[in-house]
Amino acid sequence: MTTEQNLIPIGKLLRADASSFVAGCRVKDMQNPKFGALVKVALEDGDEIFGLIQNIVINDDGLVRQLVSGMSIPSEYTEDNRYNRNLPVEIHVLTVGFKHQGKVSHQLPPKPPMSLDKLYYCTDSEVVEFTSHGRFGYFRHILRMEDQPVEELLVSHLDKARAAHGDKTNLDWYAQACQELIVSLRDDYQRLANVLNALAELE
Amino acid sequence: MPVNYLQVENNLVTFSEKTKQHHDQLKVAREQLTGTYKALDGSSAAIRTKIEKAESVLKSIYCAKPTGEPLLFAKNAPPAPEQYTLVAADGSQINPSRHRSLQFCVINVGLIKLLKGSGKAPEIEIQSSLLDFEHLYSAEGTLVGEDMVALFRDHAERKAILDFTGLDEGPIITLTDGPLDVYLGMNIDQRRKDLQEEVFTVNRHLEARGVISAGYIDKPGSEMLSRMLSVYNTPDDKLASYDDKQRPIRGVPDAELLEVCVTQPGQRSAVFEAVSKNPIVVEKRIPVCFFYLNVSQGEKPWLVRVEFPVWVSKDPNLVDLLHSVVYAETQVLDTHPYPYLLHRSHELAVISMAEADAVESMLLQQLDADGLRLGQISNKEANKALLRR
C-alpha cells in the first residue's frame, strides 16, 4: 500500500523504552492507526525504527465518563468529544527492528525514539524490505510478548505483509513465514495450535 | 506543612453544635418565609406596585419584582426546538502580580457554538489578549486588582460573544456563567463606567439581532425574594427609611424558598425582574429578569437561576425557548446537571500555571530583545515555587 497516507504522520511519540513505544493521535485521526500494521519512526540522524501496532487505547476523562452515564447524548456532543477535545488515542507499538545507514536489522535499536518523533505507516516496499530481511528474526519480539493477543497480532501482521508481498514477486514469503512460525513454536503446542487456527481464518 | 489535625479536632464538636443551631434557626426562618410567600401568591400586582414605590424613594435597593405570574407559578419545560444556535462563553485570566518577574495580565475567552440539529461538532474558538500596559495600573498608580480584571474579562467575554454570533440565523441563545450584567464593584471610576457602557452597547447590538443572552447561576445564594417580601411588608410611611440590615428573616436563599412550588424536574418558577439600585448612578445598565429552574433528576429539587434581558420576558415564546433549551442543555451532564456547553467553554478558557509561565517567558524574551533587563520574581514567590516542585 503506497499512498499519500504513508507520507502523513499518524501520530507523535508520547513515551518509549528499549522494546516498545507509545504514540498519540487525536480521536478524529482514529481511522489511521490499524492493529498489526508495520510503522516506523524516522530519527533525525536518518535511522529508522520499525514496530508493529500491538494495541490502540482510547482514553477517557471525567467529562466522557459523565457523558457515558447520561441518558442520551446529542450527536453534536459526541462529535465535540471526538473532534474538538484533547483526548489522545494511544498507539502502542512493539519495536521489531531498525534501519541504520540503509541496512535493516531485526535487533532492537541502540536507543529508543524520542518524544514527539513522528510515526508513519511503512509503504509496501518498506514492508517487503523489512520482512524479507534475514529469516524472520523479528518474530521473536512478537512471540516474547506476554498478556497480549500474540496470535491476533501475528495474523494481522501476516495478512498485511502478504498483501504487500503479493504486489511484488515473492509469493513464497507467506509460506516461509508460516513455516518459520511452526519451527519457532514447535515446543509450545498450545500456542502453535492457536496461531495455526488463527491463520486458518485468512484462507 | 500539614494541618495540625489534633487542634482542628478539638473544635469539631463545638463547630457541629453551632452549625446545628444555625440550621435549626434557618429552618424556622424558612417556614416563616414560606408561609408569607404562599399567602401572597395572588398579590403579584400589589407587590410590584410596592416595589416600584420603594424604588422611587430609596437610594439603594436590591430585590426581586414580580412581572405578572403568581408567586407560586411553576411551568414544565416545553420541548426544545429541533434547530437552534447555542453559544457559550467563559473567561479566565492571569491576574497581574507584583511578585512575578513582570507585571502583566492575560484575558482568555473560550467560545463554543452549537448548531443544534446539524449533527456537526460545535465550533470552538479561544481568544487570548494581553492587557494593554496602560490598563495595568489604576489612576493612583497601583496595580489593578482582581475586581477590575474581572470587569476586563467580562467585557472581553461579551464582545467575543457578539463577534462569534455574527453570521448566525434563527433562534440564537448565548450562555455565560454568573449574573448577566457585569459586576462593577463599589468604587466606580471612569474606566469602569466606560467598560460598562461598552458592555451595554454590546447588549443592545445583541438585542437588535434578537439574540437571547442568558446568565446561568448554579447554587444561587441570593435572597432577592426575601428582600422583596420584606419591602412589601414595610408600612408605606416607613418605606423611605427601609434598611435591609434590619430585615427580620435572613439567610433563606430564593432557591430554597421556591422549592415549595418548583418541585418537578424541568419546571421553572415565575419570572421576576431584578431591581438593582445603588447610590452610584450608572445610567446604562441592562435591565434583567430571571426565573429559577429545577434541573434535578427528580429526587430533591436543585434550583438554578437563569437571568435574561427584560425585553425577552415580554415575549412568552422567547421565555419558553430559553426555558426549554437551558433545561435540555443541563440534562446532558445529568449526574451533575450543568449546561454542557458552558462547561466546555470553561474547559477551553482556563489558563494553567504552565501557560501563565510560558506567557511570562515570551514577554521576558521580548523585553530582553528590546534591551530591557527587567524581571525578577520576589523572594517570597521564589520560595513558594520551591514548595511546588
Image (spheres, coloured by chain):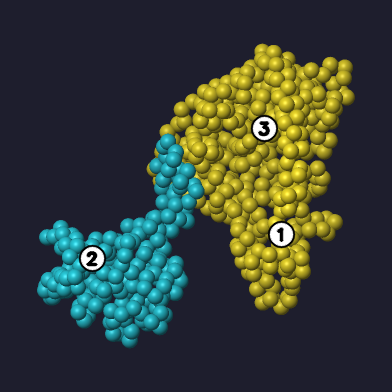
Identify the image quadrant of the C terminus of chain A: bottom left
Name the element at disc 2: helix
Give percent across and percent down for residue B265: 52, 27
Q: Colour of chain B?
A: yellow
Residue that mark 2 sits on:
A154
Identify the image quadrant of the N terminus of chain A: bottom left
Extreme-bottom residue of the structure: A101
- In the figure, is residue A152 to the left or right of B337? left
Q: Quadrant of residue B1?
A: bottom right
Amino acid identity at mark 2: Leu
Residue that mark 3 sits on:
B288
Q: Colour of chain A?
A: cyan
Q: How busy is the neighbourhood of tag 1: few (under 14 within 10 Å), some, or many (20 plus)?
A: few
In this view of the protein, which residue sits in the foreground, B363 or A50?
A: A50
Q: Does residue A154 appear anywhere in the picture?
A: yes
Give percent across and percent down for residue B223: 72, 29
Name the chain letter of the residue that bears numbered label 3: B
Amino acid identity at mark 1: Met
The residue that appears at 60% across and 47% down in the rendered structure is B90
The residue that appears at 71% across and 53% down in the rendered structure is B3
The residue that appears at 63% across and 36% down in the rendered structure is B219
Q: What distance separates the C-alpha of mark 2 from that of mark 1? A: 54 Å
Residue that mark 1 sits on:
B1
The residue that appears at 76% across and 44% down in the rendered structure is B10
Q: Does residue B168 appear anywhere in the picture?
A: no
Name the chain letter of the residue that bears numbered label 2: A
Q: Do marks 2 and 3 both belong to one polypeptide chain?
A: no
Give percent across and percent down for residue B379: 77, 69
Name the element at disc 1: loop
Q: Is residue A110 above or below residue A5?
A: below
Q: Quadrant of residue B233?
A: top right
